[in-house]
Amino acid sequence: MGSNTGGHGTSLAVIGAGVRGLGYARRAVAQGARVVAVAEPRRDTRSAFAAEFGIAPDLAFADPADLLAAGRLADGAVIASPDSCHADQAVAAAERGYAILLEKPMALREDDCLRIIEAVERAGVVFAVGHVLRYTPYTRALKALLDSGRIGRIISVEHLEPVGWWHQAHSFVRGNWRRADESGPMLLTKSCHDIDWLMHIMGEVPARTASFGSLSHFKASDKPSGATDRCVTCPVEQSCAYSAKRIYLRCVGDPVREYWPLSMVSADVTEAGILKALEDSPYGRCVYSCDNDVVDHQVVSMEFPSGATASFTMTAFTPLTHRRTRIFGTRGFLEGDGDRLSLHDFVSDLVEEHLITSAGASAADGHGGGDDALVAAFLSAAAGGDGSVLISDARTSLAGHQVVWAAEHARRTGTVVTIRKTVQPAK
C-alpha cells in the first residue's frame, strides 16, 4: 500500500457492495481515490463490483472477516454492510489501522457503539459516520445563517422527514429494515440522520424527550377486500397506492432509479425481468401481508439544556422529498425545504430568500449533495490523517443514537425520558 497526498490516490477497501457501498465507491473514484479491495457475500454483486473497479481476484472476498484478517490492504475502509455487522467490522478495521467511513447507524446497541469508540480512539484512526445531512450545501447555508445570529437565539424548531409512501413500502415494509429485531427501530435506521442534524443546528444535545407513534397502516387489518399476497396476482392492484408493479415498472429506463431502488429488486432491470422478480421477491409482496413491525409515523419532542425545544415528525405518508424545517428565533424566523431558505428578519420586518442548488433527496440522488461532500471530507481526512476536517465524530454520533434510544423508550412506555450521556460528545 503506497502513501498518498491531498486525497488523490487514496486507496479504499469496501465492505458491503450494495447500494450504499457502491455509491460511496463511485463517488470516491470520481474524486481521485482507488478502490482496491471488496468484501461482499453475494457472488454476483461481488463480481460486478470487482469488475467495475478493476479489483484483483485475490482482493475480492466473500467474507468480510477474511478481508479484515488480511492486514491493512488500503488507506481507508468503507463499511456499508448490514447494521448488525457494523461494530465487529469497525473494531477490526480500527485495529488494523484503516481510516474508517462507517454507514449510519454506528451500531444497533450502545455497548457496540462504545466498543467502536474505544477501538477508534485507541488506534488513533480517522473515523466518520455517514451522517450525510450535515454535509449538504443546504445545511451549510442554513448553519451559517444561524451562526451569524440573524435570527437571534433559537427558541424552538419544527422538523419534518417526509419518507415517501413508496420508499416506506420499499425499505421499511417489504425491505431490509422492516423489522426492529432484524435491523433496528425506524427512528434509528432511518431517522438517526435527523436527530443528528437537529443536534448539529442547535449546537447542543437534548436533555429530555417524549415520543408517540405506531405502525398504523401497513398491516393485515388495512388490507383491501379481495387483495392477494402478491401484487402480480392481485385483482385490486391497480387501485392500490403501494402496487409493486407500478412502483418498480415506473423506474425502468431511468438510470437513477435503476440504480436505486430497482437494483435491489432484480439484476435484470427490464420490464420482463422486474415482473419475473416480483413473483417471488420480497419486494413483490402485498404491503398488508408482510412481517414488518417498524412504525410508519412517529413524533419526537425534545427539550435542550438551554430550554429550547424541538419537534421531529417522521411519516411515510408523503412524497419522497427533502426535509422541511421551521426555526423560531428571538430576532427572526427561518424556514427551509432543502432547496430554499426563507429568513424573516423581525428588526427590518423584511423577508429574504436564499436559493441553494442541490440534488434530489434520495440515496439515488446522493442526498442533496451530502454524499459527495462527506466522501470528499473523508478522503481528505484519510490522506492527511487529520479528522478535524470532518463535521462529526464517533462520540457525537453516539450522543445522537442515545437520543434515539431514549425516544424509543419514551414511545414504548408513554413516559418523558431524561437522556443519559455515557460519553461526552467531542463537538
Image (cartoon, grey):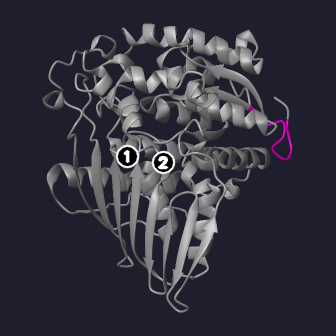
User: How many discs mark residues in the rendered view?
Assistant: 2
Give the magenta-colored segment's residue range.
Answer: 3-11
Q: Give the quadrant of the N terminus.
A: top right
- In-image side of 182 versus 53 (left or right): left
Where is 114 relative to 154, above or below?
above
Q: Mark 1: which amino acid?
A: Thr
Disc 1 residue crowd, few under 14, some 14–19, many 20+, Cα 10 Å: some
Q: Residue furthest bottom?
A: 347
Q: Which residue is mark 2?
A: 321
Q: Which mark is residue 318?
A: 1
Give the CA distance from mark 2 to mark 1.
Answer: 8 Å
Q: Decide which of 46, 399 is in the foreground and name it.
A: 46
Residue at x 72%, y 47% (from the top left corner): 376
Magenta segment: does it hold 5?
yes
Q: Quadrant of residue 30?
A: top right
Q: Residue at x 85, y 40 (%)?
A: 4
Is 342 positioned to the left or the right of 186 in the image?
right
Q: Position of residue 245 (x, y in %)?
A: 40, 20
* Left or right of 197 in this view: 240: left
Q: Are marks 2 and 1 in contact (CB under 8 Å)?
A: yes
Position of 144 relative to 359 (above/below):
below
On the image, the x and y values in percent for residue 211 come to 24, 56
Q: Is residue 228 visible?
A: yes
* Left or right: 96, with 344 as reference point: right
Which residue is more in the foreground, 218 or 306?
A: 218
